[in-house]
Image (spheres, helix red, strand yellow):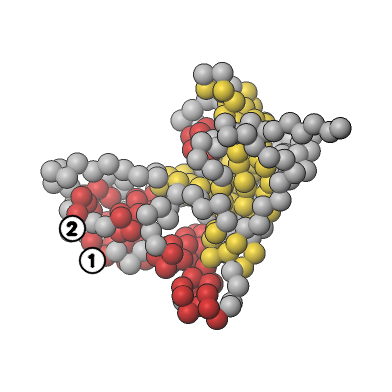
Amino acid sequence: MDISDTSSNTPSNSSTDTNAPGILLAAESINKDFAEKKILENISLTIEEGQIVTLIGPNGAGKTTLVRIALRLLQPDSGSIYHRPALRIGYMPQRVHVEPTLPLTVNRFLQLANRQDKALLSNTLEDLKIGHLEDQQLAAVSGGELQRVLLARALLRKPELLILDEPAQGVDLAGQAELYQLISEISDRHGCGVLMISHDLHLVMSSTDEVICLNHHICCHGKPEHVTNDPAYLNLFGANASQNLAVYTHHHDHDHEIGGSVKEHHHD
């Protein structure tokens, strides 16, 4: 994976080789402003087959904007986005609003993503352990169940790249660990790349290959460290959480103002 803005804030001068085998998506020197406010500055990254990348950062850091640009739903002010030709992307949104009075079952909702392959729909529901929800009203499922339904919808596209916008939002720690295990198994089974936005600045999926800390620019990046096997932790959260969650330690050489801009340090 190539990241232009490292923890030492030294941009790479080399451009991404989009002809390299295995590259699914590449962002090169992405910049984006809104209302004269810089949202993204010089962001470059690549995602390859089977690679899991977790994007973290505070609220308003530009994570969702970067994903929208990566999906080509939004144009950058400068820079470029490369997709492998005919790339199949499965996107899981952060949330969906379901009108409570709308008569829409989980099965019908998922058929909107793939009407033809009923066997795939059934197998996907079973893989995600939500087969029992098939005939339930979508508006009646719990928050954790809805996250899995949205993940199922993304998988019905038979994606080469999964983009997940805060998939564990509203899920407790045990449910988060179980969901992360499912995502890891999906990536292994299908060989698809994964780009995941996480709301947690420190606790990430243990099988993540690279964590990127974004705050308008890339503040730091690296690999997560496995959660401790301390008995007190295991008693509190269980062995499953320990296996599927990892801690990311930040190494920043700068600080941010409240608005997100980098503080200038004055030396005497």
Q: Nearer the viewer, residue 185 or 226?
A: 226
Is residue 203 depicted above or below 7 in this figure?
below
Q: Amino acid at mark 1?
A: His
Residue 212 at what x, y percent from top left? 62, 47
Rendered location of residue 154, percent (x, y): 39, 49
Q: Quadrant of the C terminus?
A: top right
Which residue: 53% across, 78% down?
A: 232
- Seen in the picture, residue 39 relative to 163 is either above or below; the reply is above
Q: Position of residue 123 (x, y in %)?
A: 33, 63
Q: Are the two marked residues, 1 and 2, in contact with CB atoms closer than 8 angstroms?
A: yes
Element type at marker 2?
loop
Residue beneath label 2, please? 136
Which is nearer the eye, 231 or 86?
231
Q: Is residue 213 left or right of residue 6?
A: left
> Cα distance, mark 1 to mark 2?
8 Å
Label disc, if present, on residue 132 of the rendered structure:
1
The 10 Å Cα crowd at callout 2, few under 14, some 14 to 19, many 20 or more, is some
Residue 21 point in image, percent of width and height: 66, 48
Q: Secondary structure at mark 1?
A: helix
